[in-house]
Image (cartoon, helix red, strand yellow):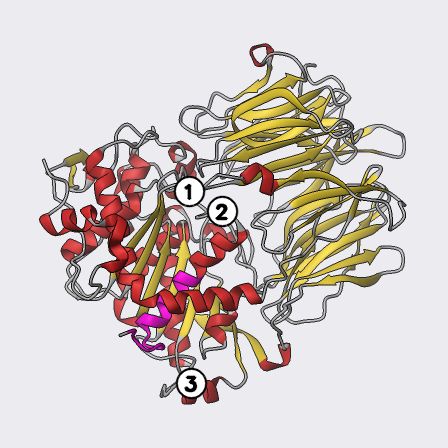
């Protein structure tokens, strides 16, 4: 049976020369409907595009499926062809803001200073080191060249990169197709030799143990789950690797790392709401592990270890066991489950984590939604020394601080108008020293921009913060472009998993702002911007708060005169792509253009399919519609794919990755197919699938930048802010 109508098949046959097609007349691909229904809890759902899910996944070899995806790509290329000059202009503009021969600030780890560099024109980094105290004329040692590893590959991404404690070896992992199944190798930095050891199908990091003679790693299951912690001894065959921990619960995932003093291996298991941690000596990783506290549903915790003044091992615990915003506790290694409060949970301060150092420790969190970095002494943990930052709204925190006896902390700071800045904070002197500020070669004057943080009332009375940046002369810019009224505004959000979108800096964003856009980030529920409760109010049976917050934020910005009806453009990716699908079902007239990246839009079907990689672990976030009729009905009520209806929708650009293990390619494909069939407008709807990439789009800094340029070209085109090519 043919997968496409004649018009779609025609587009497919001309895929290789789509650029010569008449973009005005080419018909969009129309996916065939094939009868398919399923019934749960007495409710029957029709899903005529189920066939776009290749049942041999993760192998994708169904010809009908591939023909449809390729036809959509040909249509995307044909329709975007007239905007090629604009896309290229935006790309050059964005690239000119990036320092091509850039490097990170060197940081000490053991006997060496480590940093990475981009060479001019290069897509990927080179990693270097020098001995601590080496003279400037001492040549740096090249540790790893990502460009060499990526040579000849369509896709390349470096995963883990970890140096052994002695400094002799590095272990690194790479992904060459976007599937996030990594291959690890080991390099001897004394000889430059690549060892024969090779670990394939990995998830997560790599951890050196047993005096640099072994690596701890996390293999991936067939279903792309991390359920096992394994030990590989260098030079030994992989079939002799030892399982240190095996998780039985398919909804959990596992990971491992070292304690602050590198003497304990920390093995953590958990899902989105429950944790369980074990300790094992790093020098003897096959020893019997110490269970800190058995898992208890809804209780999250993480741990670190330090020597107390009596040289006894002391466990430090970050947990939500008695307060929603977490507390900090400690316990003796002898009684690891007896947790004594160090810092109590607070309704005002949201404790997001901690770091242990030799003479002090650091707590990080948010106060009224703003990042806090606090220095505390072990003998006076309630006495806080906050690091003071210069602006009212910003993104700040610790970066890479690998040394336990560190007396100067490395910090990062940025705001919506201030480029990324790297600081050293002298703990004794309480002073910040600027080490590096992001350089923008084409020029950037922060005095031309203004940043605001406003609160918009959502329909249930909740005040939702929104961070906004725009040009001070925005009105003049719009007038020169012949735009009357308040002008366009781009609204961005994520709104899931407790991830708070920071009010940080973006060089690419300037390409919209400098053309008269206001750019806003809505700090909606589902993230943890205002504390843990803010996150919980956007998950499970309160998920629709997230969508309502976004819609109401946009409406509030219209009412306040920042923009106008139909002048809001919006974007989001993954769970933020789900957000895009929900808000256009609810309030399509608000938006002038939508960009939805790798969107999680087929929520009900995905949560019903426990064979998919992430589904069991996601039930704590979205609900389990297999066992719960209430969850089934609630997810169905908002699932963007299921709620597509016969109405006008705004112009849309949708992206996907064929190898994406997080949001599978068929979710956006099915969604676009259904939209094409049901929507009542003639607005442009495009689907672009990266055939050799995954969740993050194309790899390499220039390839990724080109995709952003495509996105902005689409937005400007649909907002009629560029002249149409003849």
- The first of marks 2 and 3 along the sequence is 3
Specify the quadrant that holds the C terminus: bottom left
Secondary element at image label 1? loop
Tell me, yes or no, whether the highlighted magenta stretch contains residue 701.
no
Residues at marks 1 and 2, CA–CA distance in whole angstroms: 8 Å
Tell me, yes or no, whether the highlighted magenta stretch contains residue 723.
yes
Rendered location of residue 111, percent (x, y): 85, 37
- The first of marks 3 and 1 along the sequence is 3
Camera-side residue of 557 and 411: 411
Count residues near mark 3 (Cα–Cα under 10 Å), then give few for <14, some for 14-19, many for 20+: many
Which residues lie in the magenta part? 709-725
Camera-side residue of 227 and 439: 439
Residues at marks 2 and 3, CA–CA distance in whole angstroms: 35 Å
Count residues near mark 2 (Cα–Cα under 10 Å), then give few for <14, some for 14-19, many for 20+: many
Camera-side residue of 67 and 495: 67
Rendered location of residue 672, percent (x, y): 24, 52
Location of mark 1 (residue): 693
Closer to the camera: disc 2 or disc 3?
2
Secondary element at image label 2? loop
Specify the quadrant that holds the N terminus: top left
- In the picture as drawn, the residue positioned furthest to the top comes out as 240
User: Is 123 located above or below residue 167 in the figure?
Assistant: below
Q: Are marks 3 and 1 in contact (CB under 8 Å)?
A: no
Rendered location of residue 542, percent (x, y): 38, 52
Q: Are marks 1 and 2 in contact (CB under 8 Å)?
A: yes
Residue 431 appears left or right of 410: right
- The first of marks 1 and 2 along the sequence is 1
Secondary element at image label 3? helix
Location of mark 2 (residue): 699
Count residues near mark 1 (Cα–Cα under 10 Å), then give few for <14, some for 14-19, many for 20+: many
């Amino acid at each position: 049976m043919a997968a496409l109508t004649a018009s779609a098949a025609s587009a497919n046959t001309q895929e290789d020369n789509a650029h010569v097609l008449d973009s005005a007349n080419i018909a969009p691909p129309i996916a065939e409907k094939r009868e398919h229904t399923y019934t749960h809890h007495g409710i029957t759902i029709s899903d005529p595009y189920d066939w776009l899910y290749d049942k041999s996944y993760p192998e994708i070899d169904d010809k009908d499926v591939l023909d449809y995806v390729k036809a959509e790509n040909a249509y995307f290329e044909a329709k975007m062809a007239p905007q090629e000059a604009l896309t290229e202009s935006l790309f050059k503009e964005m690239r000119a803001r990036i320092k091509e021969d850039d490097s990170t600030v060197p940081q000490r780890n053991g006997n060496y200073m480590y940093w990475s560099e981009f060479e001019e024109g290069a897509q990927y980094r080179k990693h270097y080191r020098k001995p601590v105290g080496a003279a400037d004329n001492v040549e740096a040692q090249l540790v790893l060249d990502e460009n060499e590893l990526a040579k000849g590959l369509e896709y390349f991404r470096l995963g883990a990169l970890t140096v052994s404690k002695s400094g002799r070896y590095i272990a690194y992992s790479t992904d060459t197709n976007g599937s996030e199944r990594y291959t690890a190798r080991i390099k001897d930095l004394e000889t430059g030799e690549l060892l024969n050891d090779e670990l394939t199908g990995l998830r997560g990091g790599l951890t050196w143990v047993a005096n640099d003679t072994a690596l701890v790693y996390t293999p991936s299951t067939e279903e792309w789950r991390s359920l096992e912690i394994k030990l590989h001894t260098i030079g030994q065959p992989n079939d002799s690797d030892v399982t240190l921990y095996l998780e039985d619960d398919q909804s959990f995932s596992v990971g491992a790392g070292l304690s602050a003093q590198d003497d304990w291996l920390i093995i953590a298991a958990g899902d989105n709401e429950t944790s369980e941690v074990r300790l094992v000596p790093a020098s003897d990783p096959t020893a019997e592990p110490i269970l800190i506290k058995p898992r208890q549903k809804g209780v999250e915790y993480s741990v670190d270890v330090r020597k107390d003044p009596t040289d006894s091992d002391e466990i430090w615990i970050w947990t939500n066991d008695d307060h929603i915003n977490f507390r900090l506790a400690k316990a003796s290694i002898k009684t690891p489950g007896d947790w004594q409060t160090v810092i109590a949970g607070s309704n005002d301060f949201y404790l997001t984590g901690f770091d242990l150092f030799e003479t002090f420790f650091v707590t990080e969190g948010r106060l009224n939604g703003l990042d806090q970095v606090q220095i505390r002494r072990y003998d006076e943990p309630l006495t806080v020394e906050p690091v003071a930052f210069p602006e009212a709204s910003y993104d700040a925190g610790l970066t890479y601080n690998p040394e336990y006896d560190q007396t100067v902390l490395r910090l990062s700071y940025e705001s919506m108008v201030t480029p990324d800045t790297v600081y050293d904070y002298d703990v004794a002197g309480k002073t910040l020293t600027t080490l590096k500020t992001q350089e923008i070669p084409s020029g950037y004057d922060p005095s031309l921009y203004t940043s605001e943080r406003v609160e918009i009332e959502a329909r249930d009375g909740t005040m939702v913060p929104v961070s906004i940046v725009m040009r001070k002369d925005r009105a003049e810019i719009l007038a020169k472009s012949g735009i009357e009224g308040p002008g366009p505004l781009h609204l961005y959000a994520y709104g899931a998993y407790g991830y708070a979108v920071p009010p940080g800096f973006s060089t690419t964003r300037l390409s919209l702002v400098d053309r008269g856009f206001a750019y806003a980030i809505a700090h909606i529920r589902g993230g943890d911007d205002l504390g843990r409760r803010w996150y919980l109010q956007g998950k499970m049976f309160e998920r629709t708060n997230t969508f309502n917050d976004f819609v109401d934020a946009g409406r509030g910005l219209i009412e306040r005169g920042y923009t106008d009806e139909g002048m809001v453009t919006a974007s989001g990716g993954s769970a933020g792509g789900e957000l895009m699908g929900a808000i256009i079902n609810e309030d399509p007239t608000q938006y002038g253009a939508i960009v939805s990246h790798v969107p999680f839009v087929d929520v009900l079907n995905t949560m019903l399919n426990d064979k998919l990689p992430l589904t069991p672990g996601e039930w704590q976030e979205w609900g389990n519609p297999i066992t719960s009729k209430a969850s089934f009905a609630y997810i169905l009520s908002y699932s963007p794919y299921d709620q597509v209806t016969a109405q006008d929708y705004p112009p849309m650009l949708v992206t996907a990755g064929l190898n994406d293990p997080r949001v599978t390619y068929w979710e956006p494909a099915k969604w676009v197919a259904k939209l094409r069939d049901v929507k009542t407008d003639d607005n442009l709807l495009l689907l672009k699938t990266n055939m050799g990439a995954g969740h993050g789009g194309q790899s390499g800094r220039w390839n990724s930048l080109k995709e952003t340029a495509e996105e902005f070209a689409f937005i400007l085109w649909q907002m009629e802010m560029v002249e149409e090519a003849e």
